[in-house]
Image: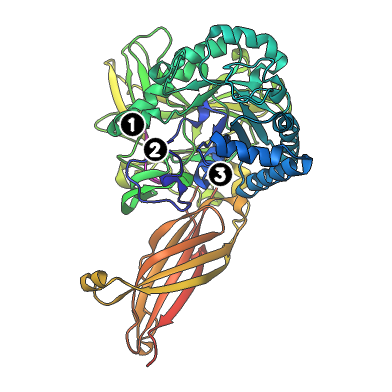
């Protein structure tokens, strides 16, 4: 989008205003980061967000124009050692940056010698990738044909089939019609799902449908049983009004919803605050920490199904979901649910998540929410479960309606002592008008299938009830996981320290004199136990005779998703004559189960400094 590597390139986030944000992850299976660089490595933030949603991520290897042709000749026209060396490097890049494979896009003419080595190059790359990257994937784009010419076919046929047979999938060009799909049915055989029919959302050229008519293309693709490759869905951001981005994004993906069955969340714990990885302020459990725009794709929490739910046989009752930056419980956004309960029904419900999780002996659920405005509508969680005996081991199965039932969990008013850290405010009014409700569920031999939120009319009400509800957090946690001890952050160290004096204009504005500190923080902690780390600092100066400075409230610096963080140009007071300066860095682990860790258990490292001696 727009050349790639925009505000998304900053590993620790940025202060970007109104950036592009993708959040319909449950609708897709593969995310390709595309640019016109020879080797496009997906930014870490996209990879983290995609993997959190169970979506695999591909980089792009693209060769274009005369220069691209010369490069391809250099490694493809020779013997196998040349193309194997390139493939080995692509595998190492994917392994190091922890993404899942490559889209290979050669749009330069090749000699017969070079094009003859493309199939063995693809086979070798696919084989080596699968050995080093579990679930690795290599896709080929419809451009070069077996003669070496660049001739987009807009279909899989005898001129490009040799490439399809040599890798995991084939991405067709965009200017196809239904007759192309008819012909491909026989060509693809049992591998129809491995043919990704290209759809240009910008609708360039002779296409069936793009822009807000993209669903017309999807309808034909699904009719013929193929997969779909949506190219440049950033159209809604690039070409339409930025102020209407979320509305247009929801409209675009909502039109495609019937053709994009959601994939399921398959493991516990499942915790989300619905944060988009951006916002106009930062909030931590209802407490505002910082004001100002921020953008950090790695911080995006698991996103729900954005849809409108209407009860069967009723034209008035409905519930619709929206992402909303106006308020948040934890992060930068929350999930807004608007709806109407008509007089003839008692409640309406909306499905937020598709799950496929075998139920452990006991699970706990938590919901943080608040109703906007005067409303006595009841809010509850509902689960859909299925009989685990009908599931196929090792695969994803669709359970029939006859084996499904919906359960309303029993509220957990007084949580067991061992859960006190996980949930300390069940059933209570929290800051900012939020309410937390907790549930205990005991189900045997079942698979969790769906998570719903239900809204019921107040007792005695017979009028139409309109409501606006904001969800701040949902949690589904295996009770046993809360009994295991939480590791401690250990071995926090400070290295690569650099000091700079503040710019003269800054020193004029701020007294006492200021310094700028940059350094690297490292620590030890098992990453499988955390969602992220919150990095804080405390700053103080004082004289040795006065003793250590008093405690200062920690200031949030940012988030880390590995055991390191780079502090850049942190403003600290210069140490005057006879005084020492002290900066303490604190590393707060955020457990996967979603509870606050007491400050006494955070990792710490202090940096003491003084002015130059004369």
Real-space Cα distance between discs 2 and 1?
8 Å
Residue 509, disc = none
Taking the view exactly as shown, the residue that stands out farthest to the left is 509
Is residue 79 rendered magenta in the image?
Answer: no
Report the mark closest to the observer, 2 or 3.
Answer: 3
Q: How many marks?
A: 3
Q: Main secondary structure of the magenta part?
A: loop
* SS at badge 2: loop
Real-space Cα distance between discs 3 and 1?
26 Å
Q: Quadrant of the N terminus?
A: top left
Using residue 385 as the reference point, say whether residue 175 is left or right of it.
left
Using residue 567 as the reference point, say whether residue 514 is left or right of it.
left
The part of the chain drawn in magenta is 330-335
Residue annotated with mark 2: 20
Residue annotated with mark 1: 245
Real-space Cα distance between discs 2 and 3?
18 Å
Labels 2 and 3 touching (C-beta < 8 A): no
Labels 2 and 1 touching (C-beta < 8 A): yes
- The location of residue 139, given as percent across then percent down, is 64, 30
Give the class, few, some or many, for how many residues have Cα within 10 Å of label 1's Cα (few <14, many ≥20). some
Residue drawn at 64 percent across, 12 percent down: 184
Residue annotated with mark 3: 41
- The location of residue 356, given as percent across then percent down, is 61, 28
């Amino acid at each position: 989008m727009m050349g790639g590597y925009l505000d998304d390139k900053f590993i620790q986030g940025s202060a970007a205003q109104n950036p592009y944000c993708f959040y319909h992850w449950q609708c897709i299976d593969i995310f390709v980061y595309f640019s016109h660089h020879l080797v496009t490595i997906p930014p870490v933030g996209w990879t983290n967000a995609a993997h959190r949603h169970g979506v695999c991520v591909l980089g792009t290897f693209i060769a274009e124009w005369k220069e691209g042709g010369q490069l391809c000749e250099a490694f493809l026209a020779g013997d196998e050692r040349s193309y194997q060396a390139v493939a080995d490097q692509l595998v190492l890049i994917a392994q190091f940056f922890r993404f899942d494979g490559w889209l290979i896009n050669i749009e330069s003419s090749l000699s017969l010698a070079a094009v003859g080595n493309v199939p063995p190059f693809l086979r070798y790359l696919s084989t080596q990738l699968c050995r080093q990257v579990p679930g690795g994937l290599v896709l080929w784009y419809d451009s070069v044909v077996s003669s070496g010419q660049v001739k987009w076919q807009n279909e899989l046929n005898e001129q490009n089939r040799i490439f399809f047979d040599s890798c995991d999938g084939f991405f067709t060009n965009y200017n196809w019609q239904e007759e192309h799909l008819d012909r491909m049915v026989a060509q693809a055989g049992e591998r129809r799902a491995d043919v990704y029919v290209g759809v240009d959302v910008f609708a360039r050229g002779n296409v069936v449908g793009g822009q807000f008519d993209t669903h017309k293309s999807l309808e034909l693709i699904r009719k013929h049983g193929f997969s779909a490759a949506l190219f440049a869905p950033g159209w809604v951001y690039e070409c339409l009004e930025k102020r209407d981005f979320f509305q247009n994004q929801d409209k675009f993906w909502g039109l495609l919803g019937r053709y994009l069955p959601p994939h399921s969340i398959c493991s516990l714990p499942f915790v989300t605050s619905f944060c988009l990885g951006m916002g106009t302020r930062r909030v931590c459990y209802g407490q505002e920490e910082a004001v100002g725009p921020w953008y950090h794709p790695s911080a995006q929490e698991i996103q729900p199904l954005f849809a409108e739910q209407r009860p069967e046989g009723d034209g008035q009752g409905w519930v619709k979901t929206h992402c909303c930056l106006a308020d948040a419980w934890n992060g930068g956004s929350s999930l807004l649910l608007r709806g109407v309960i008509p007089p003839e029904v008692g409640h309406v419900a909306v499905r937020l998540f598709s799950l496929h999780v075998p139920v452990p002996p006991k699970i706990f659920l938590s919901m943080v929410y608040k109703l906007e405005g005067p409303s006595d509508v009841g809010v509850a969680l509902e689960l859909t479960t299925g009989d685990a005996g009908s599931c196929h081991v090792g695969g994803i199965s669709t359970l029939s309606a006859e084996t499904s039932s919906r359960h309303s969990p029993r509220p957990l008013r007084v949580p067991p002592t061992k859960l006190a850290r996980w949930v300390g405010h069940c059933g209570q009014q929290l800051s900012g008008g939020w309410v937390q409700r907790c549930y205990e569920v005991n189900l045997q031999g079942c698979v969790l299938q769906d998570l719903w939120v239900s809204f019921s009319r107040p007792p005695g009400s017979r009028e139409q009830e309109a409501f606006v509800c904001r969800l701040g957090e949902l949690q589904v946690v295996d009770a046993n996981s809360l009994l295991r001890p939480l590791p401690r952050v250990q071995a926090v160290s400070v290295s690569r320290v650099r000091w700079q004096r503040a710019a003269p204009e800054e020193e004029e504005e701020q007294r006492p004199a200021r310094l700028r500190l940059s350094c690297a923080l490292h620590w030890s902690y098992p990453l499988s136990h955390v969602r992220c780390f919150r990095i804080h600092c405390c700053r103080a100066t004082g004289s040795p005779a006065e003793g250590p400075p008093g405690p200062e409230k920690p200031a949030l610096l940012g988030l880390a998703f590995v055991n390191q963080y780079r502090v850049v140009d942190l403003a600290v007071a210069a140490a005057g004559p006879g005084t020492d300066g002290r900066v303490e860095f604190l590393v707060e682990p955020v457990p996967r189960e979603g509870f606050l860790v007491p400050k006494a258990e955070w990792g710490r490292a202090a940096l003491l400094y003084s002015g130059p001696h004369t």
